[in-house]
Amino acid sequence: MQALGFKSAMTQEEPIPADKPRLLAIGAFALWVAAAAIGPKIGVEGHSAFLFGAGNLPTDAVAAFPWASHAEPVNALSIPTWAIHFSSVFEFLFAMALVWDFAEATGNEKWKGLTWGMLPLHASGIAACTYHFFYNPSSLQFLVSTQAGLTLLGNITVAIAAYRIAVSNGWTVGELNPFSKTETSPEGLAIDEAAAMPLQLTGTKESDVVLVAKLSAATLLTSYLVKYGELGLDLPFNPNGFAGAAIVLGVPVITSAHYYKKSQAEGGEMSLFGFGGEGGGNPLSMADVKKYGVAGTVAYVLTELAFWAVAFPVASTLFYQSVGHWPDVINDGGDRGAVLASVFAGANIARLLVPLRFGAALALAPWVDENLINREKT
């Protein structure tokens, strides 16, 4: 629905009738009610080959796979359940791409900030899939907490991105006033004028049917590949916290790198929330921080120290989740190397957030100037 909505907004001159999405939602809900009512009467069990094998392939067929070196655990997800997870992941990827294109269609770069804001939610979906990939072991319970934290973070970043989009379109906090503006108020006239501006439409690259077909094919193929392909691997049956964390971080980093390179090529916004330098075209840099003098430099040092203060406890916790004991970084070279490798990986990922770190330093600079640098003067 997200992907189709943005696609229609860019390619259709007339808005989608209000009744169409409502009818689709009602129809989907009706199908869910019917499935819930009829499902228990079918007589299938956890690993029954229902829907002609679409839910789960027969056990003897799975055992005959030449690569299957492990038996599937009883708590393995069914194909429909995997499909629900992967459809969410793929739909978010499709929607992020369409939001980026929507920024080009509207000429409003702030929409690209929404793509960046959706990254934590994308990572949250990856965290859930990773936990199920390892068959939900208690030793990787931290992935569940990670998913919850990423969901919270994603809700915040998407809200910030939505606020920036609204402000760029002339929205003000005063519009939260429940009493409607008069027809002659400046605010009301400005809003009407913005709403009447023509949208730059783009030619449709593919029909809605093709888009849905691509999403469905990617979902089903990935579901079958993961469910039955991992039976030939030892990793899912030997839970490893570092491997789980690498998957959760690695996939979003690849997605981030794609949009980072794309934004560089287009000369648009490159940071998480689209912070820009002077003129709004360039990202924040250390030169912007240095404009605040000593206060700016101290503020940046504090933000860097905050990162390292968090990095070591997080790396140590991942180590504990993986091997069952806290790292002895003083006496054990192996433990020390594993923790430092995890911190190094996190530092490389943090490079993608450099503009955001500069923004945090700039936000902190006035407080540093008042409370640390010039405290005696005040």
Image (cartoon, rainbow, N blue to C red):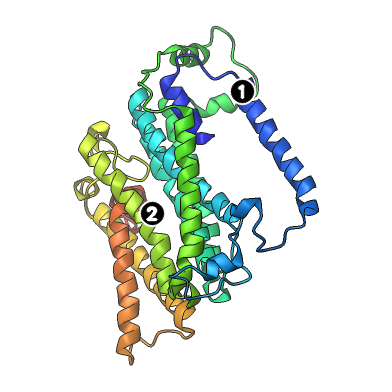
Residue under label 1, please give it: 20
Q: In the rendered image of this protein, does residue 107 appear above or below residue 75?
A: above
Name the N-terminal-most of marks 2 and 1: 1
Q: In the rendered image of this protein, does residue 237 appear above or below residue 130?
A: below
Tag count: 2
Amino acid on which disc 1 is placed? Lys
Which residue occupies 37% across, 42% down? 273
Amino acid on which disc 2 is placed? Pro
Q: On the image, which quarter does residue 268 sit in?
A: top left
Left or right side of 334 for 146: right
Residue under label 2, please give it: 252
Q: Position of residue 241 (x, y in %)?
A: 45, 73
Q: In the rendered image of this protein, does residue 109 appear above or below residue 264?
A: above
- Give neighbour class at mark 1: few <14, some 14-19, many 20+ (Cα, 10 Å): few
Q: On the image, which quarter does residue 50 sit in?
A: bottom right
Q: On the image, which quarter does residue 24 sit in?
A: top right
Q: In the rendered image of this protein, does residue 120 appear above or below residue 234?
A: above
Along the viewing direction, whichever of 37 and 152 lies nearer the viewer:
37
Left or right side of 49 for 321: left
Q: Which mark is residue 161?
A: none
How far is mark 2 from mark 1, CA to CA? 33 Å
Q: Where is residue 71 in the image (x, y as percent from the top left)?
A: 55, 74
Q: Where is residue 34 in the image (x, y as percent from the top left)?
A: 76, 41
Q: Where is residue 56 in the image (x, y as percent from the top left)?
A: 60, 59
